[in-house]
Image: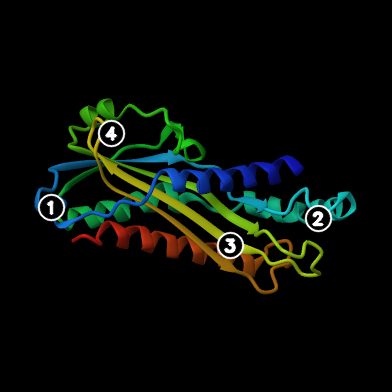
Amino acid sequence: MRRLFTLGLIALVAVITGCANNANIDTNKDYWQHKPNTVVIVTTHTDKPQYADENAGSRGAIVEIVNLLSTQKLENHLNQMDVDWYYQDLAEQFKEALVKENIRVVVASEHPDLKSSTIFSTNPKLNWPQLAAEYNADQVLVLAMPFYGARIPQQANLFASAPPIEGVCVLYAELSDPQHTTIYWRHTSIVTKPVLNANQPPDYPNLTQSIVDSRKMAEEELLDSLRSGR
C-alpha cells in the first residue's frame, strides 16, 4: 500500500513539474481564421484513479502505519471507479466542438505507448508525423489525464485530527502540427474539490461525488480554453 501512495504522489509531482515546463497556450483569432481541414485526436493511456498523500513520510512511523491501514479500503474503492468517460466521452466532446467550427475530426484509438504519466517527457513515445499521415490530418490533438482520484494536500499541522481530503482531476490537452514544432493550443486543467465527511467506507459517496465533480469541472475548463480565442 505504501507503494501505491508513492506512485500517486509521484504522479502529482510530475504534473506540477510538467505544468511549469509546459505553459498554457491559448488559441487566437489567427488560428480560427486559418483553421485546419482535419484534426486527429489521440487519447493517451491513463492509470486507475489514485490516492496521493502529500504528507506521507512526514508524520512519524506510528502515525504513518495507522494512516496506511485506514486508507486501504479507499484505495480499493478508487481502483474500481469508472474511467470509461475519459476513453469514450472526452475525445467526442472535443470532436463536437471542432466540428462546429467546420473542421473534420478523426478520433484515433487509444495510444498504448503514450501514458499520461509521461506526457511531459521530452521524448514521449508518439510519432506525430506518422499519426497525422495515417489519418490524413493537418494537426494532432493529444489528450491526457495525468492524475485522477483523491489527495491529502500538504499540511502545516501534520497531526491534525481530521486531515483534509480532496477530489482531484488533472486533464491535459495539446494541439500541434504533425511535426510537433508548432503548438497551436495547450492547456492543463487542475481541479480540486474539498470533501466533507469523506470517511464513508466502502463506497465513499461524498468523496466519489467530489472526484466526479472535479472531473466535470476540468472537462469544462479544458473545452472553454480551446474556444477562448474564438
- Residue type beneath disc 3: Gly
* Side of 39 where 16 appears, left or right: right
Please name the amino acid that badge 2 sits on: Asn
**CB atoms of marks 3 and 2 within 8 Å:** no
Q: CA distance from mark 3 to mark 2?
A: 18 Å
Looking at the image, tell me whether mark 2 or mark 4 is earlier in sequence order: 2
Using the image, tell me which numbered label, if any, was put on residue 30.
Answer: 1
Structural crowding at the residue carrying mark 1, measured as other residues with C-alpha within 10 Å and reported as few (<14), some (14–19) or many (≥20) = few
Q: CA distance from mark 4 to mark 1?
A: 19 Å
Res 141 quadrant in image: top left
Kind of residue indicated by mark 1: Asp
Q: Secondary structure at mark 3?
A: strand
**Which sits in the foreground, 77 or 14?**
14
Mark 2 closeness class: few <14, some 14–19, many ≥20 residues within 10 Å: some
User: Which disc is residue 67 wearing?
Assistant: 2
**Mark 2: secondary structure:** helix
Q: State the residue position of label 3.
A: 167
**Secondary-structure class at tag 4:** loop
- Residue at x 86%, y 50% (from the top left corner): 65
Please report the residue visible at 17 percent of the width from the left and 32 percent of the height from the top: 136
Q: Label 3 to label 4, Cα distance in Å? A: 33 Å
What residue appears at the point 51 percent right and 39 percent down from the top-left corner? 117
Q: Earlier in the sequence, mark 1 or mark 2?
A: 1
Which of the image's four quarters has the C terminus? bottom left
Residue sticking out furthest to the bottom: 196
The mark that comes first in sequence, 3 or 4, is 3
Q: Give the residue number, with chain letter if any, for mark 4.
A: 180
Identify residue type, mark 4.
Answer: His
**Residue 162 tag number:** none
Q: What is the C-alpha distance between the residues marked 2 and 4?
A: 44 Å
Q: Are marks 1 and 3 in contact (CB under 8 Å)?
A: no
Upstream in sequence: badge 4 or badge 1 = 1
